[in-house]
Amino acid sequence: MPPHPILLDVTVDGRPVKGVFQLSKQAFAYGFDRVTGKPIWPIEERPVPQTDAKGEWTAATQPFPTKPPTFDLQGVSTDSLIDFTPALRQQALQLLEGYKWGPIFTPPPAAASGSKGLIQVPGLGGGANWPGGVGDPELGYVFVGSATNPGTVLLTPNANPTTTPDSACCDADYTMGGQAPQLPNGLRLLKPPYGRITAYDMNKGAIAWQIPNGDTPPNIKANLEKAGLTNVPPTGSPSQAGLLVTKNFLFAGEGSGGMAVFHAYDKKTGQEIWQGPLPGAQTGLPMTYAVNNRQFVVVAARGPQGSGAQLVAWAIAPPAPAGDQGGRGRGGQRGQQ
């Protein structure tokens, strides 16, 4: 569980609840009453696929929250594969021949089985990660950035088992291997979005809105164009957005693997209000502070090639006068340190 837990007071079925919400790399959001420790909504133990790898064992069931819904893709199905054209969908199915794939908690196969490996979704870098999420006490919302990054896992015999305590390995029977299937033109196996921002209404245990994590990155757009695919809706960056929620806005970079863009969204609807360039990809979570009654937002980012990291700050423009609907959140000024 790399993300931090979020403390948030909500109202569920008319009852006030002091909640604690835990996001996971599996794209689950677990909700508990932090006074009693009991789940806010039932968590069910459900049967899951079992391993057939020699020497391995897996639990017969795993816990599934009944609410809220998952915030990113779990497992691989025909419906989750690339579908820009029927031919690409068919290509993806052909590529998956020899691989193991299925619902979440599908265990990886051993190399001895002849399999090429398990296509695991979320992969090791998918779902939520260390940037975690943020809670809004006014709306009772939890916001989370996630990435739809599949991984390939194959249980490969451990050629050099050791029991030395300070060894880099261990005495396990297997190490992890496997190579992911690759579509022509660098196209991704799964359909977009490749990165998401999800807003949960934790009063209801429901998704209030969900949007792609930004526009389509240039490298993905170039691959789509090579394949003759144009007018594809925004795919989002395949990276976890680093978030900050304030009274009016949800601020978001596109994460360490995303585009060098910083966004301000309407926290109630997910509509983008403003965006500004960064010198490089976001590397830390945004923060806000005030000086002389003027509010600023600052975020850490990579510097341009050959330079060091930077802190980039914007001043938030004051609210528009009554009756003036233009300019809300616009006109931010940027300074760099």
Image (cartoon, rainbow, N blue to C red):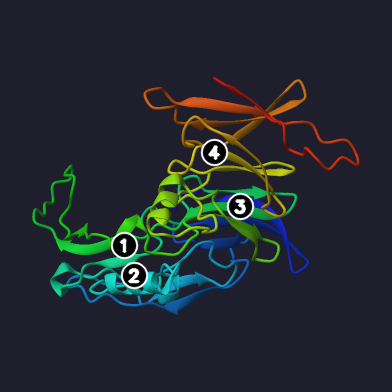
Quick check: 265 above or below 85?
above
Q: Amino acid at mark 3?
A: Phe
- Look at the numbered discs 1 and 2 and tell me whether their residues touch, using CB distance below 8 Å: yes
Give the image quarter of residue 251.
top right
Q: Are marks 1 and 3 in contact (CB under 8 Å)?
A: no
* Residue labelled with disc 1: 183
In the image, which is nearer the foreground, mark 4 or mark 3?
Answer: 4
Q: Can you tell which quarter of the image residue 175 is in? A: bottom left
In space, the residues marked 4 and 1 are separated at their CA atoms by 28 Å
**Nearer-N-terminus badge (4/3):** 3
Q: Secondary structure at mark 2?
A: helix
Cα–Cα span, label 1 and label 3: 32 Å
Residue drawn at 50 percent across, 50 percent down: 216
Location of residue 55 in the rendering, given as x and y in whole percent from the top left corner = 18, 70
Mark 2 and mark 4 lie on one chain; the one further toward the N terminus is 2
Q: Mark 1 vs mark 3: which is more N-terminal?
A: 3
Find residue 196 and report its horizontal and vertical position in percent.
Answer: 53, 55
Which residue lies under the disc numbered 2? 92
Whole-Å distance between the Cαs marked 2 and 3?
A: 32 Å
Q: Is residue 167 left or right of residue 220?
A: left
Q: Residue at x 47, y 71 (%)?
A: 63
Can residue 274 be spotted in the picture?
yes
Q: Which residue is mark 4?
A: 261
Residue beneath disc 3:
143
